[in-house]
């Protein structure tokens, strides 16, 4: 366990946790329901079409803000299918991807703005693997802690100040795969559910509820009042996961890779548990550890 104190927990209280396709003259992109970006409509074939002028998705520093973007096939398709996204955002696609979206009826009423791969590269952060698709969106509102926990058992994952987008995205993916009810994060110390995080989640951020709370310790107190028990992950714990888990509603608490679960958060866990590692290499990436914990918790729920 970490010796760091959960400073915010002592100071702040708990908070509850495009138009459709356009039609046009027969032939060309508009017949298939795409909306061409202005440059794409005016520049000759083979030219760099790019996004509409003035909408480069950049912050004041001149770089694209990843919290406003989703990219890649799985994250964008999941967002398009998410009812909470209906009527919002700007969808950019290469001609090949646009044809796929229209053929398979995957736009869900969102209008496509046709562009090319080079223009998408300029729209997005360096290194973004967009696969010909990008979606400029506002952040999802999320759910309240009570809505996430109410009405039955199961497993919830709480992330104690995990900030690496790849790890958080991978945990979302594992949580969805193993049937978790949702994720709880601290609102001031967690990355936006977009950009590289959404890409790493393979669309799970659009399908798995997430509650953002001010104070994790108080959130655990509220969950305990609602019948949930918290199991914190700690490599130095005496009990193993198999010993600690049972069929009761369970919150799996994962700490950051550097500090682990912070002391005040750990004090609100009913038990701390470890993953036994007979191989002698006592270190796992936090997303790998979360996947193992979720698998064991899902097994315990079926006992």
Image (cartoon, rainbow, N blue to C red):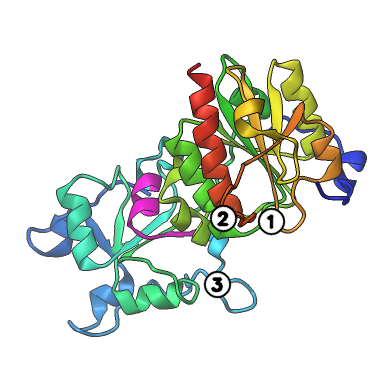
64 vs 250, nearest the viewer? 250
Q: Which percent across, then down, holds residue 60?
A: 64, 74
Residue under the point 14% across and 50% down: 103
Dots 1 and 3: beta carbons under 8 Å?
Answer: no
Residue under the point 25% across and 46% down: 106
* Chief SS of the magenta region: helix
The tag on residue 58 is: 3
**Circle 1 sits in a helix, a strand or a loop, which is it?**
loop
Q: Residues within 10 Å of mark 1 (few under 14, many from 20)?
A: some
Whether residue 20 sits left or right of residue 13 in the image: it is: left
Q: Which percent across, then down, holds residue 40?
A: 27, 74
**Circle 2 sits in a helix, a strand or a loop, which is it?**
helix
Observer-side mark, 1 or 3, equals 1
Residue under the point 48% across and 77% down: 126
Residue under the point 40% across and 41% down: 86
Q: Residue furthest left?
A: 26
Q: Is residue 194 above or below residue 186?
A: below
Q: Residues within 10 Å of mark 2 (few under 14, many from 20)?
A: many
In the rendered structure, does residue 73 fall within the stretch colored magenta?
A: yes
Mark 2 sits on what residue?
A: 167
Whether residue 8 sits left or right of residue 239 in the image: it is: right
Mark 1 sits on what residue?
A: 257
The tag on residue 162 is: none
Could you tell which of marks 1 and 3 lies nearer the N-terminus? 3
Could you tell which of marks 1 and 2 lies nearer the N-terminus? 2
Dots 1 and 2: beta carbons under 8 Å?
Answer: yes
Could you tell which of marks 2 and 3 lies nearer the N-terminus? 3
> What is the total number of numbered labels drawn onto the structure image?
3
**Which portion, as a residue range, is magenta?**
69-79
């Amino acid at each position: 366990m970490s010796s760091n104190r959960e400073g915010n927990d002592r100071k702040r209280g708990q908070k509850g946790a495009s138009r459709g396709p356009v039609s046009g003259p027969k032939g060309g992109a508009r017949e298939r329901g795409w909306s061409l970006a202005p440059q794409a409509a005016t520049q000759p074939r083979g030219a760099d079409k790019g996004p509409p002028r003035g909408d480069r998705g950049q912050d004041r520093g001149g770089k694209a803000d990843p919290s406003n973007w989703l990219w890649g096939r799985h994250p964008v398709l999941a967002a398009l299918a998410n009812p909470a996204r209906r009527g919002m955002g700007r969808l950019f696609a290469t001609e090949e991807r646009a044809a796929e979206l229209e053929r398979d009826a995957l736009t869900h009423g969102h209008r496509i703005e046709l562009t090319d791969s080079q223009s998408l590269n300029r729209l997005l952060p360096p290194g973004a693997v967009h696969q010909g698709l990008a979606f400029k969106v506002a952040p999802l509102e999320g759910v309240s802690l009570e809505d996430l926990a109410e009405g039955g058992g199961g497993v919830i994952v709480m992330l104690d100040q995990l900030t690496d987008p790849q790890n958080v995205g991978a945990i979302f993916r594992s949580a969805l795969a193993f049937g978790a009810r949702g994720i709880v994060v601290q609102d001031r110390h967690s990355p936006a559910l977009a950009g590289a995080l959404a890409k790493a989640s393979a669309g799970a951020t659009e399908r798995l509820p997430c509650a953002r709370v001010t104070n994790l310790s108080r959130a655990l107190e509220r969950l305990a009042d609602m019948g949930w028990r918290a199991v914190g992950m700690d490599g130095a714990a005496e009990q193993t996961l198999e010993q600690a888990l049972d069929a009761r509603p369970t919150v799996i608490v994962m700490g950051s890779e550097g500090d682990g679960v912070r002391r005040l958060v750990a004090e609100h866990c009913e038990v701390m548990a470890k993953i036994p590692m007979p191989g002698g290499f006592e270190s796992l990436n936090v997303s790998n550890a979360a996947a193992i914990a979720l698998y064991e918790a899902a097994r315990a729920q079926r006992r």
